[in-house]
Image (tube, grey):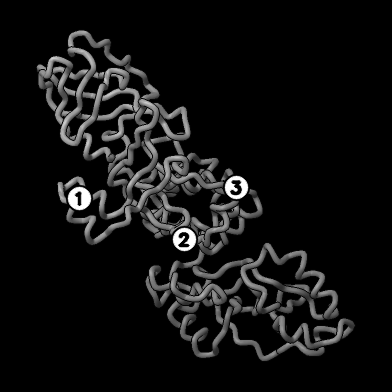
Amino acid sequence: MYLTELLSKKVFDKNDDHWGKIKDIIISADKTYPRIEAIKIKANGENYFIPSSYIDQITTNKVILAKPLEDIIQYPKQDSSIKLSRDILDRQVVDMEGSKIRRVNDVEITYKKGEYYIIGVDIGINGLFRRLGLGKISKKFHPEDNIISWKDIDSLDFSNLKLKVSKEKLTRLHPADIADIVDGLGISDSMSILNSLDDESAADAFEEISPEKQKTILTEMEKKEAAVLVDEMSPDDAADLLATISDEKKEEILRLMDPEESQELRELLEYPENTAGGIMTTEYAYVTGNMTTLDVMTTLRKIADEVETLYYIYILSQDDDLEGVVTIRELLLNNNDTKIYDYMNKDIISVDVNEEEDEVAKIIAKYNLVALPVVDENNKMKGIVTVDDAIDIVLPTAWKKRIPTMFR
């Protein structure tokens, strides 16, 4: 049977006196499949909590109690008790497998050895139609119910219903999929999801969340948590986010961050928002021209996790002048002992740090670049603008997420 079917049943005691309808079902969350502890009814203007041990029979249209109502000892109030109608119906379920937010439309109940147990939640269309009294009609068109087993429900916090999932499994989701889940939740639920991830995974997912939601979450977060999250984000995304919050909150976060990362963000925040400097990242791969191919490959292995993209490797002088660029492909095609200066491309397409972002996007598109180096008036390397940053300029976030991962 289902919860919505029970809620419509009339309650009669042993003397066949009618005492109204079931208002709610009380369960305890201490078992894999929790037992119904009591039913809540309203009689004579008062609420009665009747232990399940007093239920004699549940028929197709009524519930029969084993004793007269006045002889029943009520179920004691317990803070840990869960009311199915109040606490479970209409709750959002985070479906980690499908990366979707689903709504609980009904609760499935079974009878075994004289007891009633909760075995799952219905997130399908049939549960919704049952609540409208159209269950039989719906069943003709949708014979299969969409049930999530109760053992897969995270029972730690029923105000924020979630499917059980290990941190490892959640981390394996694409950051954009996690972001889709977070975007569909309230602030408290969103923060719970992010807090269940390691710092790096949380930052990756956070970067994919809508800007409005990012700002709200960061504002609600504790300062130390916010600092850790921003510290793990790519500098360009972190700077864009910090630019949207109050100066007071921004300064608090920057003070709690790693000093080197904090200083990097302060410098990025000085650039106008819609310029190359305002959208660039400072995490790029660079080497010096006197290094051999083998030296460069060894260096890249060490810095791979710290840079935005490894497609281009920039060659800088000792004074940070941009002298050349090579690709991974060119590294693989040259001998290990060959100096990189001998085959680097010296005709570099770059952009001034103060160039308008629209023009930056046009240059990236015109020359089919994965990244575009950003320099100052003295040709000092300042950062790079990646193709996904250019896409952000010309496409909404929803469309950006459709771009293949290889370009992001």
Q: Is residue 301 visible?
A: yes
Q: Nearer the viewer, mark 3 or mark 1?
A: 1
State the CA–CA distance, disc 3 to disc 1. Answer: 56 Å
Identify the residue position indicated by label 1 in the image.
135
Q: Secondary structure at mark 2?
A: helix
Q: Amino acid at mark 2?
A: Asp
Image quadrant assignment for residue 22:
top left
Q: Is residue 290 visible?
A: no
Q: Amino acid at mark 3?
A: Met
Q: Residues within 10 Å of mark 1 (few under 14, many from 20)?
A: some
Q: Is residue 359 left or right of residue 128?
A: right
Q: Secondary structure at mark 3?
A: loop
Q: Is residue 405 left or right of residue 41?
A: right
Q: Residues within 10 Å of mark 2 (few under 14, many from 20)?
A: some
Q: Residue at x 35, y 53 (%)?
A: 146
- Across and down, in percent, residue 127 comes to 26, 49
The residue sitting at the right extreme is: 337
Q: Residue at x 47, y 81 (%)?
A: 361
- Where 296 sits versus 106, above or below? below
State the CA–CA distance, disc 3 to disc 2. Answer: 27 Å
Q: Amino acid at mark 1?
A: Gly
State the CA–CA distance, disc 1 to disc 2. Answer: 33 Å
Identify the residue position indicated by label 2 in the image.
177
User: Which disc number belongs to residue 257?
Assistant: 3
- Across and down, in percent, residue 334 comes to 81, 87
